[in-house]
Amino acid sequence: MVMRLNLDCHACCRKVRRILLKMKEIETHLIEKQQCRVSVCGRFRPSDVAIKLGRKMNRRVEILEIQEFGANNEQVDRQQPMLTS
């Protein structure tokens, strides 16, 4: 899943990283400060992660892209823009 949120300073990136590391359902993450994007992988509900991150960061989070993997590891793309505040 790829999310967009305002990462204007290095401290914000550290805070996002700390929040993501504490979430047990997230396996890997990638923080792109220049593009203001956060990519996460794992077994979770995308809306739950976006809402939790938005509440802890006190910022708006927008879900840009959701990629799901089927039962036989085939990739299924689903794109739906979603805003949480």
Image (cartoon, rainbow, N blue to C red):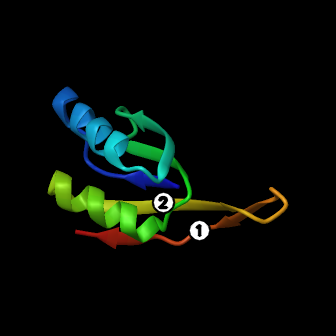
Q: Quadrant of the C terminus?
A: bottom left
Mark 1, residue position:
79
x and y percentages locating residue 7 in the rendered image: 25, 40
Q: Residue at x 28, y 44 (%)?
A: 19
- Judging by the rendered image, the residue that carries numbered circle 2 is 64
Residue 42 location in percent, x, y? 55, 52
Q: Is residue 10 left or right of residue 69?
A: left
Residue at the top extreme, as displayed: 10
The kind of residue tagged 1 is Gln
Q: CA distance from mark 1 to mark 2?
A: 7 Å
Give the SS element for disc 1. loop
Which of marks 2 and 1 precedes in the sequence?
A: 2
Locate residue 67, reporting x and y percent: 63, 59
- Give me the disc on residue 50: none
Residues tagged 1 and 2 counted as in contact (Cβ below 8 A): yes
Residue 9 placement, left or right of 34: left
- Residue ID at (35%, 44%): 20
